[in-house]
Every structure is written in C-alpha cells, then in structure tokens.
Image (cartoon, helix red, strand yellow):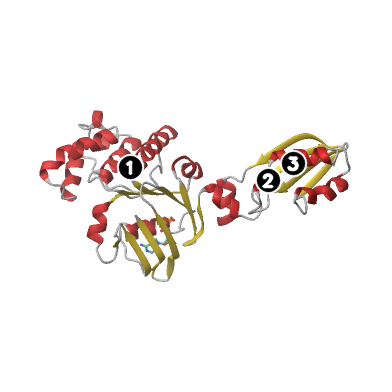
Amino acid sequence: MIEVKNLSKSYGNVEAVRDVSFSVGADQVLGFLGPNGAGKTTIMKILTGYHFPSGGSALVDGISVEDDPVEVKKRIGYLPENVPLYGDFTVDEYLAFAADARLIPRGERKKRIKACLEACALADWRSRKIETLSKGYRQRVGLGQAILHDPPILILDEPTNGLDPNQIIEIRSLIKELGRRKTVILSTHILPEVEAVCGRVLILNEGRIAAQGTAEEIAATMKGGDTWELILKGARAETIKAKLPLLGLSAASSENIEDGTVYLSFFVPAGSRKDITSGERIFDWAVACGLKILGMNRKKLSLEDIFVKLTA
Ligand code: ADP
C-alpha cells in the first residue's frame, strides 16, 4: 500500500528526514514514534502530497507522491495535528463543506456523510455547532472529514494530542476499529498509544529510523533485552556464577548476596535460542546445581525502555 525508499527532506539547512525506508501493507496500523522534531509530521506531509521530498521516493498504492499528488490525495484521509475546523458550522454543515472540497458526487454525499456520522459516533451531534463541542468530539469531526471519501489509507498526526484520558480511550478504539478495514499510519509520542493501537512501530530520531518492527521484534534485536531476576540459595555467589555456562550464559549482569541468599540477574542474550532462557530450563539448571529458587521473574523490555535507549 505504501512504499517509502531512501526518503529525505530538508528545510533549508535543517535535515528533517534522512534516508528513511519502510513499507506498510493493506489493513495494517503502523505507529510513528519519536520525540518532537524527529520528522514524523514531515514524512506524513510527504505521504499526503503536501510536501515534496528532497530525495528518495514514496509510493501510495503504486502512485508516486511527486508525479500525481492529486491521485494520492484521493486515496488518503489525513488528520493533521491541528484540524482546520470552522466553529460556526454545525457538524453536518462542516461535513457537507468537506464533501464539496473532496468533490464527492452530489448523489453520494448524503450516504457518505451518514456513514461518517455513524463510524465516528457523531449522529446525535450533527446539528451542534462545532465551537460548542468538546475537544474529543471535535477530534471525531476531524476523523470524520478524513474518512468522508472512504479512502483505503488514513494518516493521523497525533490524533489524541490534548485529549483527556476518557477521550483518548474513545478515539483510540475508534482508530482501532477503522484500522480493521484501512491502512493506518499514526504518529505519537505517547508510548502506550502505540502498544494499544499499532501492530508495528517505526521509531524515529533526528530524522532517521532508529528501529522498526513489532515491539517484541525490536526488543529481540536490542543488546541487553529481557532480564531474568533470580533469587537463589544453596551456594556462594562465585559457585553460582561458575555454573552459569551450563545455562548457556557467560556472565551475570549483577549479583548481590545477603544472608546467604544470592540475587542474580542476567540479560537474555539477543538472538538466543528460546530454550536457553526459558523458565523451565533455569529451573532444571538450579536443581542440577543443588540450588533452591526463592524467586524468579522475567522482566520484559518495555517499549518505554526501548524508546529511551534509542532516542535519549
Ligand atoms: P515531528 O513531527 O516528529 O515533531 P517535524 O517533522 O515536525 O517533527 O519536524 C522535523 C524537523 O524539521 C524539526 O527540526 C522542525 O523544526 C523542522 N521543520 C518542520 N517543518 C518545518 C518547516 N516548514 N520549515 C523549517 N523547518 C521545519
């Protein structure tokens, strides 16, 4: 659906996007995650045909954003960070105005507006002036205009920015629902948002891709991934450490001894075979070494840990 190759974009001497490549298939939800200024909005503006790239290429449904931005816009629904809504309009009037701008044929307008109102749960608010709506409902109107022409692709720039926690939950579930039938790219700097909504994530930092994949895939490629924390009894720390190679590990990352109890932790080596680090294997190892396990806990590398490691 979307194919981006070696994309770059400079504003004067600011290199906002540098050599970015990724693709998104049909009905996938991809999250752009990155600190402010990472280049998320710039990539979105290129994909939606509002900015031209300085280098590289971006294809939307096989169409180059540079060669035919109008055709690209037909296939994309875009929710910019600040949606240009007109407070004086009612929801109905605004959607009719957006339908005009989208050149939706007259015969289809009523049907499309009705579908939008339903998809965004706005039917009861259709006669309300936009200026009287809460921020969450205004965001729904923004989403409504983005899906009005029933595009196969949605690009949503920080869709939950500035909403309260209840509104965030509502908009996220709406996006998830839309993502079942559409390809969605959304940007955010909120980590739980990516985990809640996106199948895949692309972490951007200073215009470059720092990592991409599912959160689990990214964690697996990172040095020092998950951590096992064990509490063992029955031998001195040195003896326990000497037995670690039996577990396929060369060393512990930390150990601590208190009253003959050894607190041991080690990283799951990146790319290691699963059985090396399974709880069952650790249990067998401890029994074979005559150790008592008082506690064992596998701490998964969270998206937050990954984000901090990659962008700090
Ligand atoms: P993000 O969406 O991740 O916050 P942006 O794509 O908005 O990042 O910005 C990336 C970089 O490009 C930033 O350094 C920003 O200041 C710069 N930038 C964005 N838009 C413009 C512009 N129109 N003119 C000049 N610099 C810009």
Q: Is residue 5 above or below residue 83?
A: below
What residue sits right under mark 3 in the picture?
282
User: Tag 1, which secondary structure?
Assistant: loop
User: Closer to the N terminus: mark 3 or mark 1?
Assistant: 1
Residue at the location (42% across, 32% down)? 166
- Image location (x, y in percent) of residue 74: 23, 53
Q: Is residue 99 left or right of residue 152?
A: left
Specify the amino acid type for callout 2: Asp
Q: Is residue 176 left or right of residue 230?
A: left
The residues tagged by marks 2 and 1 sit, at their Cα atoms, a distance apart of 38 Å
Residue at the location (75% across, 51% down)? 248
Specify the amino acid type for callout 3: Ile
Specify the amino acid type for callout 1: Arg
Residue at the location (80% across, 40% down)? 286
Mark in the foreground, 2 or 3: 2
Mark in the foreground, 3 or 1: 3
What residue sits right under mark 2 in the picture?
275
Front-most of residues 190 and 224:
224
- Image location (x, y in percent) of residue 43: 38, 59
Disc 3, disc 1: CB below 8 Å? no
* Quarter placement of the C terminus: bottom right
User: Tag 3, which secondary structure?
Assistant: helix
User: Closer to the N terminus: mark 2 or mark 3?
Assistant: 2
The image quadrant of residue 172 is top left
Is ligand 1 less than 8 Å from the beta carbon at label 2? Answer: no
Is ligand 1 less than 8 Å from the beta carbon at label 1? Answer: no
What residue sits right under mark 1 in the picture?
181
User: Tag 2, which secondary structure?
Assistant: helix
The local crowd at label 2, few if under 14, some if 14 to 19, many if 20 or more residues have their Cα within 10 Å, is few
- Image location (x, y in percent) of residue 15: 44, 67
